[in-house]
Image (tube, helix red, strand yellow):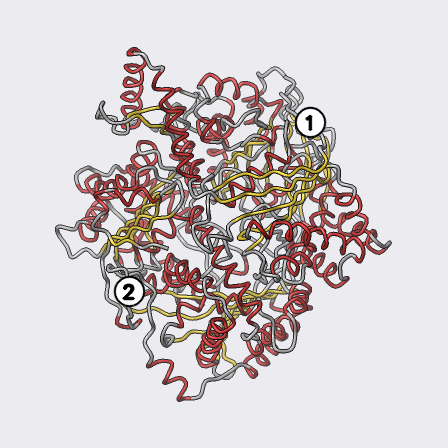
Amino acid sequence: MLRQAKLGKLAHNLTARGLKLSAWPTLSKPSRHSIRNSPVYNRGYATVESGPISKHQKITEGAVIHGFEVVETRSISELNLKAIRLTHHLTGAEWLHLERDDNNNVFSVGFNTSPEDSTGVAHILEHTALCGSKKYPIRDPFFKMLNRSMSTFMNAWTAHDYTQYPFSTQNEVDYANLQSVYIDSAFNPLLRELDFLQEGWRVERSDPNDKTSPWEFKGIVFNEMKGALSDPGSLLAIRAEQKLFPDTTYSYVSGGDPQYITDLTHEALVKFHRDHYHPSNARFFSYGNFPIESQLERVNNLIQTYEPIRPKTVNQIVNPYGVKDVTEFGPPDGVGSTDKQAKFSVSYLANDIKDIYESFSLSIFSSLLINGTSAPMHKALIDSQIGSDYSANTGYNPYNRQSSLSVGLQGISEADIPNVKNRINEVIQEVGAKGFESRRIEAALQSIELSYKHKTASFGLNLMKSISTGWFHGCNPIDLLEINKNIARLKEDIASGNFFERAVEKYFNKSEHQLNYTMIPDSEYHKRLNEDEKRRLDEKVATFTPVDIEAIYKKTEDLAKEQMKKEDLSCLPTLTMEDVPKNSVRHSVDLSAVDCVPVQWRGTSTNGISYLHIINAFQSLPGDLSYYLPLFCDALGYLGTTKRDMSEIETDIQLYTGGIGFSPLVTTDHSSLKLSEQGISISSHCLDANMEKMYTLLLELILETNFRNTNRLKTLVVSNASNMFNAIPHSGHVFARCLASSTLTSEMNIAETHDGITQVRFINKLAESTSEEDLLKVSEKLEAIRDHVFDKLGMRAAIITNKGSFDGNQSEIERLVESYPALNPKQQQDSSSNGQESGAISTDGNENVQSNGDFTPNPSKIFCPLPFATNFAAKSIRTVPYTSPDSVKLQTLAKILTQNFLHREIREINGAYGGGALFSPSQGIFSFFSYRDPNPVNTIKTFDRSLDMILNHSIKDRELREAKLSIFGGLDAPISVSQEGMAYFTTGITDDMKQARRDGFFAVTEKDIKEVAEKYLLPAANDIKSSVAIIGEQELINNKELKSWNQVSL
């Protein structure tokens, strides 16, 4: 398990619509201590060596193809694609097609859906539209198509001003199938009231079978948004935006505010669809190497009967109000000093985003002002240690019609708010007088060039995301693609002098619209919300007549019947097993050695980029050092070296590389769960011309990092504590799974120490003790780790590059190995003989110490109470390693359980935002999980009941085929060039092992599924090693069923 980026590092990429982690786009939070280089627009651009292959020579401007007129065609050289913009003659629907030699084709249909209230109508419609359509009149054809397809991506989302339904696939038949389902769901949804009650909200007895049980609000979106708004950072970002844009659509919560969601009616939902989901209000997007003509024909056949309309408009332009100060109350963070939990931000109105160049230049301005240790705001706000981190809304926000730029801090005392406000203003005035350092500007622009040369697996999807906001606000989408023009113009403007200084004058000094927003923690905040919810519920219930109550009982009964109904799915299109390639894609590698260091080489088309991966493996860390390993990795990219300040190093990293990353690594042996490897993973990439610089910078950080820089170390510790805690409400299901699994295998035991609740507890304890004496002790721990992990005898490297760059990389890896540290024999013996102190949480609440090699599974029940209005549940079971014949059967079992039982029981009936079963073949763990779950205790029982579905019911051929198709879709998903051959490098899994596993999936039978279910999941028959965990609301402490569970508090 690799440690990922802050905030999202534990997020599991679950493709089901019901499991997406965000209901609408949120501002990306600038990372202060990551030295990964993030492009300004986060486009993830990639290119191919040759230009696009044109299958559409006849497509010229003015041509009419199946009712669509070609308005414009343009080649975008920097992206190696041809852009084709079309308009539907009858309705005015817009279509952008990006023709590019890429097999991972993308399609999307979207609509302007700016809200006029906070009922979440657009968000609930996004869900309900996918619950059956005229051509596909079954419940949730979207979810069912996940199992009849080999899609590489399927989802839907609601931004503030638009809703989109995108998918991607490499199979042309699959593409046509999904396109048909998507467009019929968008334009001809059934929008049944029962689906609205399930997806949106309803009033129902807490136990539908007990008419004396209390009334309560239920609904998937209702529960989702309760969870989303319980996170203090997200709440600040949402409330501050509402106050910045009064009397506009942005003063409403597009995802829905729970206190207003219960005002939405089914009739209003149907009307919103009628007004907004119309071809005249639609944007179609397609990308890749599939022909466009057949796509145009399919869509035209569906929309040609529509009469054109004038799309509904809402106010998106705010009337400037000067300077406004707003103070509101919010939830406390739950960790950290109780007197430093206030949050404050200053927001400035910026440009109309229809000015594409101005948006581009302000993105660069924001990056230079805020991002990284060399940024002036970082030095003034973060290095000063006034607060723990930037506020969640900090950064440039180009997602509204009028953009804004915000700067703020969280984890501050109320008394420090005037100081923070003054510091922000002082930095802005300093930038207005002096501008930015020229090397930092050069580095920011250089990072954009490298970012669109970097080949990613989801190029088309990322491209669609990057242009959507501007396109839905009226920009020409092709103009949004022309990055080189914007870069060239910006360079000219900068060269003319005082460009960014003028931006300060225009948007800050002469600002006519500025918000100073303060959020004060209220320990009774969630209690007050619950009381308000109960009041609103009581008011509704008080109006119920006997007839109303009987109608509610009838709808409750009808919904339950609908959820349990067996459906004929024959109307849905599907792939067959004949559509699945028999052989997996292979990535050949060559092996060599430099001195004692194994080196793996992969020669391929990389667009002039070299990718370097290093693993430093070790047997164990002495004492409690394992707890400190994540901090050690972050410190390497944050503290600076004994010779240079980190701000100077960071600029070099951005100038010459795509970032340098250090992460703890732990993997399970592919053939034995008793064996695991731990170490540190190091990665970087650069243009071939900068190869020497990349290796030199890497060596500098490894050899010379100054762990005695206690001032910056304190900042890092406090920030990590805040970020780790804030990740829980977004990725709680992953934390819960990690917590449950930590008691079962050595890998997950260590992973919990590094990335789980144990690490949250540990880093928060460190943050509470940051005296100079305490920090020096931490420095000593980090130095001890350095002396144990950086050893060339435990090192291996992988290089992915153009074959013409082999020699250059060979020389550089030889130089790196020659300079790399090497432990003497006594140090190696000391390192291997010291047991590692595991971070897994024991059943008695104390950390237990176990040698990695002597790990013993310890089945447990764990409850972790947190101050959030949401819950997450997990159950994990120790099974078999990757190469076991039962591994493929267990993975197929997980799919069958999710598709045919758990999705219905956890999401549709229980009202959680998502849930299912997962099998991790690399970890040997079979898991159940739920996400944003209103009743996690009941969900744990549902996990256990799922076994009855498998053992006592026949598995249909269709169910088995659909499970396999879904699995093959994941196996065949494209990967970024930087990851080619990395499975073998990281875990030793060969292409032959992958092929054997693929063959195994083809061969799985119903008998196999029942056998592994009974063998590994049936407690009564076997020595099952399983654990359960719930992370959730404090009130669950009083649940009698959790009284005997081990409680872990932060």
Q: Determine which quarter of the picture holds residue 992.
A: bottom left
Residue 92 point in image, percent of width and height? 66, 23
Q: Residues within 10 Å of mark 1 (few under 14, many from 20)?
A: many
Front disc: 2 or 1: 2
Relative to 609, say whether 333 is above or below: above
Q: Determine which quarter of the picture holds residue 784.
A: bottom left
Residue 630 point in image, percent of width and height? 46, 65
In this view of the protein, which residue sits in the foreground, 533 or 977?
A: 533
Determine if residue 43 is in view: no
Q: Residues within 10 Å of mark 2 (few under 14, many from 20)?
A: many
Q: Mark 1 sits on what residue?
A: 69
Which tag, 2 or 1, sits closer to the chain's start? Answer: 1
Count of numbered circles on the image? 2
Q: Mark 2 sits on what residue?
A: 673
Residue 988 point in image, percent of width and height? 39, 67
Query: In this rendering, would 781 be left or right of 445?
Result: left
Give the quarter of the figure containing the C terminus: bottom left
Query: In this rendering, would 634 be left or right of 281?
Result: left
Which kind of residue does numbered mark 2 sit on?
Answer: Leu
Q: Determine which quarter of the picture holds residue 625.
A: bottom left
Give the quarter of the figure containing the N terminus: bottom left
Relative to 922, say whether 152 is above or below: above
Q: Classify mark 2: helix, strand or loop.
A: strand
**What's the CA distance linking mark 2 and mark 1?**
60 Å
Which residue appears at 48% of the width and 21% of the height? 269
Query: In this rendering, would 78 be left or right of 632?
Result: right
Which residue appears at 25% of the width and 29% of the height? 207
Residue 327 point in image, percent of width and height? 58, 39
Q: Classify mark 1: helix, strand or loop.
A: strand
Which kind of residue does numbered mark 1 sit on?
Answer: Glu
In this view of the protein, which residue sits in the foreground, 780 or 218?
A: 780
